[in-house]
Structures are given as structure tokens and as C-alpha cells.
Image (cartoon, helix red, strand yellow):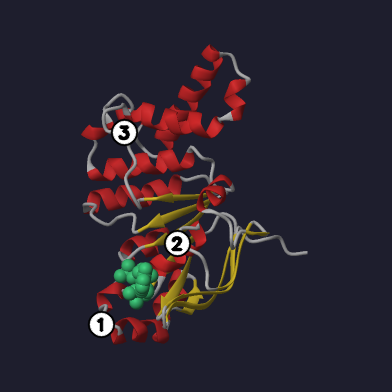
Amino acid sequence: MTTAAVLELRGVSKAYGSLLAVDGVDLRVERGERRALIGPNGAGKTTLFDLVGGRSRVSGGRILLDGADVTTMEEHRRARRGIAKTFQHSNLFDGLSVLDNVAIAVQHHAGVARRVLRPAARETAVTDRADGLLATVGLGDVAGATAGALSHGERRQLEVAIALATEPQLLLFDEPVAGMSPAESRAFVGLVAELPAALTVLLIEHDMDVVFAVASRISVLHAGRMLAEGTPEEVRASAGVQEAYLGGGSGEELFRAP
Ligand code: ATP
């Protein structure tokens, strides 16, 4: 018996009027994968992410999360089942400390469990967990700073800690390094490498240096269809992929060596 993939798309389509933004896409992402979704502008990447996260509904096909059909499930219920998204909108409390931002997320997620703990034990457990998450994303040293004082890259690291507080099984990154400095991008690559091995990551990213540094597999979307899938080496060597990018005018610089 094959085990269920963390995420599986079967013939997923999304139509906007007569435009098929996503056109019969099959995708299988296994536990612990670092999967990148790439493709020229307008390929359908964001549309596909929104279908997975539940922000919009498919026009056809099915979406399975850990073997369960979530195709028609509301966005917040998918989140509870383990899909976390970052970088769509910044939802930080700028006036609160970095630690408190994470502690609130931990506490919110703990929900029922925390009610059975005595208040003091509860507070310690929440703070310990928040501290641990900040260490995971490399913000241990600035736990006491206010979130509003963080750099752009640090804010994104904090958003990852908040996403991790929900104990997701699938983490969706939408253009994580957009607007980051080269140093911040490198820090992000290091952060992904340090994430728990069982966590599954799906990211959309235009920066191919980051894609090749982070991804264990790459899926290439073109005009709504899955053009290719493979290891970074296979995708880099694919003539079809190069042609799609070059034909789309997105530039051969996408395939420069990392
Ligand atoms: P980019 O890399 O530029 O972000 P993308 O690969 O994420 O592009 P999408 O944003 O998913 O591509 O868009 C795919 C196609 O669907 C495009 O032709 C876009 O114009 C169209 N599209 C996206 N959202 C809508 C919408 N709400 N209504 C109509 N058309 C849409």
C-alpha cells in the first residue's frame, strides 16, 4: 500500500471566464519535501496556491491533504488541518515584542489544551514553545525587541515562527524572498534548511538561486499546465523548460548557475 502524499492534486483546474488559469494539474508532494513551484509570469502559480490554501475554489479536479479530500473545505478549516501560509499579508503586532507575537500564536493554537493547565504552568509552556520557535527561525537574540523594530527579513522570519506555531504539516511560501536583501535571502535559505525534516514545504519563487538552494524537487508550470517536474538538476537540464521561459520572455537569467 502506498502512503498518502501530504498534498495531492488530481486534474485541478481553475477557470476565470474563458481563461483556464490552471488547466488539469496533477501534483503529488511527499512528506518532508521542499518543493518549488516555478514558471513565467501568469503561469498560474498564485492561482494554484490559492486553490490549495482554500482562498478560492477549483473549477474541476480534487485536492487531497494527507489523503483526505479538502477540495470544498473552507480556508480556515484547511488551516486547522495543517496548511499554513506565509507572506500573503503581514499580520504582526508591531507594538508587541517579538516573543509575544509568537506566544499569542502558540496560545491561540493550543486553545483547548491550555485550559487544562494551571495558569503558571500554561504561561511557562507557552513561553518555552515561543522561545523554541524563535530559535528555529534564527530570532532568538531579538526576542525582547518590538516587532515594529525588525528589518524586513526579520519580519519574515517572525512570520515563519508564527506559521510554525500552528504545527502545520504543509507550509506554503509565496515568493518568500521578494524585497529581501541578498544577505536576508541567504538567511532565509538557511532557515528553510533548519526547518523540521517532517515538515513539507511548497514555495513559489522567482529567484532561481533560492529555488536551487532550497528545493529538493521542482515543478514547472506554464500557461496553467504542469510542464515538467524533477530534481533541480533535471529541471535545469530540460530543454522544454528553458524554451518555455525563453519563449515567455522571462529571461535566461532564470537558469544561471547558483
Ligand atoms: P506571477 O508570477 O506574475 O505572480 P502567476 O504564475 O502567479 O504569475 P497567476 O497570478 O496565477 O500567475 O495568474 C494566472 C492567470 O490567471 C493570469 O493570466 C492572470 O491574469 C489570471 N488571473 C489570476 N487571477 C485572476 C482573477 N481573479 N480574475 C481573472 N483572471 C485572473
Residue 111: x percent and y percent? Answer: 56, 30
| Helix, strand or loop under label 2 | helix
Q: Earlier in the sequence, mark 3 or mark 1?
A: 3
Q: Label 2 belongs to which residue?
A: 50
The three-letter code of the residue at mark 3 reads: Phe
Q: Amino acid at mark 1?
A: Gly
Q: CA distance from mark 1 to mark 2?
A: 25 Å
Query: 97 or 212: which is nearer to us?
Result: 97
Residue 40 visible somewhere in the drawing? no
Specify whether 184 is left or right of 216.
left
- The quadrant of the picture showing ligand 1 is bottom left
Q: Sequence order check: which comes first, mark 1 or mark 2?
A: 2
Q: Residues within 10 Å of mark 2 (few under 14, many from 20)?
A: some
Relative to 74, residue 256 above or below: below
Q: Secondary structure at mark 3?
A: loop
* Image coords of residue 130 (percent x, y): 45, 29
Q: Nearer the viewer, residue 32 or 65?
A: 65
Residue at 51% x, 65% y is: 57
The structure residue drawn at horizontal position 29% and vertical position 41%, both measured from the top left corner, is 155
Q: Name the residue tied to disc 1.
A: 249
Viewer-proximal residue among 216 and 224: 224
Where residue 11 appears, x then y in whole percent?
Answer: 58, 76
Q: In which quarter of the view is residue 206 placed?
A: bottom left
Q: Are marks 3 and 1 in contact (CB under 8 Å)?
A: no
Ligand 1 within 8 angstroms of badge 2 C-beta: yes
Decide: few, some or many residues near mark 1? Use Cα within 10 Å; few <14, some 14-19, many ≥20. Answer: few
Instruction: Name the quadrant containing residue 145.
Output: top left
Label 2–label 3 contact, CB within 8 A: no
Disc 3 within 8 angstroms of ligand 1 (CB): no
Q: Which numbered marker is on residue 93?
A: 3
Alpha carbon distance from label 2 to label 3 = 25 Å
